[in-house]
Image (spheres, coloured by chain):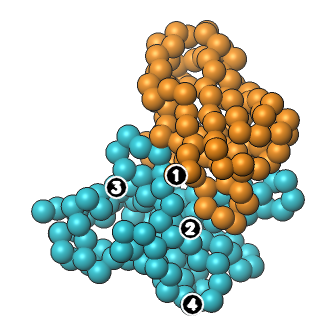
Chain colours: A cyan, B orange
Amino acid sequence: AQSVAQPEDQVNVAEGNPLTVKCTYSVSGNPYLFWYVQYPNRGLQFLLKYITGDNLVKGSYGFEAEFNKSQTSFHLKKPSALVSDSALYFCAVPWGTGNNRKLIWGLGTSLAVNP
Amino acid sequence: DVKVTQSSRYLVKRTGEKVFLECVQDMDHENMFWYRQDPGLGLRLIYFSYDVKMKEKGDIPEGYSVSREKKERFSLILESASTNQTSMYLCASSGHLNTEAFFGQGTRLTVV
């Protein structure tokens, strides 16, 4: 079955340090990959996506993600974390055919950036 | 600024009531989605629609129905609300599934 895994429920990092939020996928073919962020009591916001081409994708708020086909991973990264980056992060992959296409979601990773 | 607007941020309803959650998008998107979000369970798809009057069941459609009479509006209906439907409900829209989805601010529904 197609799936997306975020192996860490929570990630803690000190402000100013680099951060990584992990995502691995089990989807056949060449997938599109998305990252979304959810701030407290808000809906989700799109961060970035991988379609094809350069394996390093740059997105909003200084985030980037690295696609690794051999490891089937799409980890989200930021060189220097901010307290305001504290939020819930979701990885997602579109899957399906015809009118039955939908997004497969990871369960989310809660990022806490400590001052 | 593109928008997906959900009619209520917070809602408290009684068990057995019929509940309507409304979602409107202003981006002329074909696809619209209803999710519920619960701690530890991530986002679970309830229903989605790829065109006016069209709907497809998601992963957890039981106890819910939807209506899409106009392209911009997608309604979620709880026919007879139960306490296990207490949750955060998120509406989203996208032009194509391979493009980013836009989410509403969410409706936190409490059924008492």
Left or right of residue A115: residue B106: right
Q: Which quadrant holds residue A103?
A: bottom right
Residue, x 62% and y 34% (percent of image)?
B23
Quick one: label 4, few (<14), some, or many (20+) residues within 10 Å?
few
Which quarter of the rendered picture does the C terminus of chain A lie within? bottom left
Q: Disc 1 is attached to a residue of which chain?
A: B
Residue B104 vs B17, above or below: the answer is below
- Out of B94 and B57, give the one closest to the viewer: B94
Q: Give the structural element (helix, strand or loop) at label 2.
A: strand
Q: Are marks 2 and 4 on the same chain?
A: yes
Q: Disc 2 is attached to a residue of which chain?
A: A
Q: CA distance from mark 4 to mark 3?
A: 27 Å
Residue A46 vs B38, above or below: the answer is below
Q: Disc 3 is attached to a residue of which chain?
A: A
Q: Are marks 1 and 4 in contact (CB under 8 Å)?
A: no
Tell me, for residue B1, which label it has, or none. Answer: 1
Q: Give the structural element (helix, strand or loop) at label 1.
A: loop
Q: Are marks 1 and 4 on the same chain?
A: no
Identity of the amino acid at label 3?
A: Ala
Identity of the amino acid at label 2?
A: Phe
Q: Which quadrant holds residue A7?
A: bottom left
Tell me, for residue A54, which label it has, or none. Answer: 4
For label 2, the residue is: A34
Q: Which quadrant holds residue A111?
A: bottom left
Q: Are marks 4 and 3 in contact (CB under 8 Å)?
A: no
Q: Disc 4 is attached to a residue of which chain?
A: A
Q: CA distance from mark 2 to mark 3?
A: 16 Å
For label 3, the residue is: A87
Residue, x 80% and y 31% (percent of image)?
B69
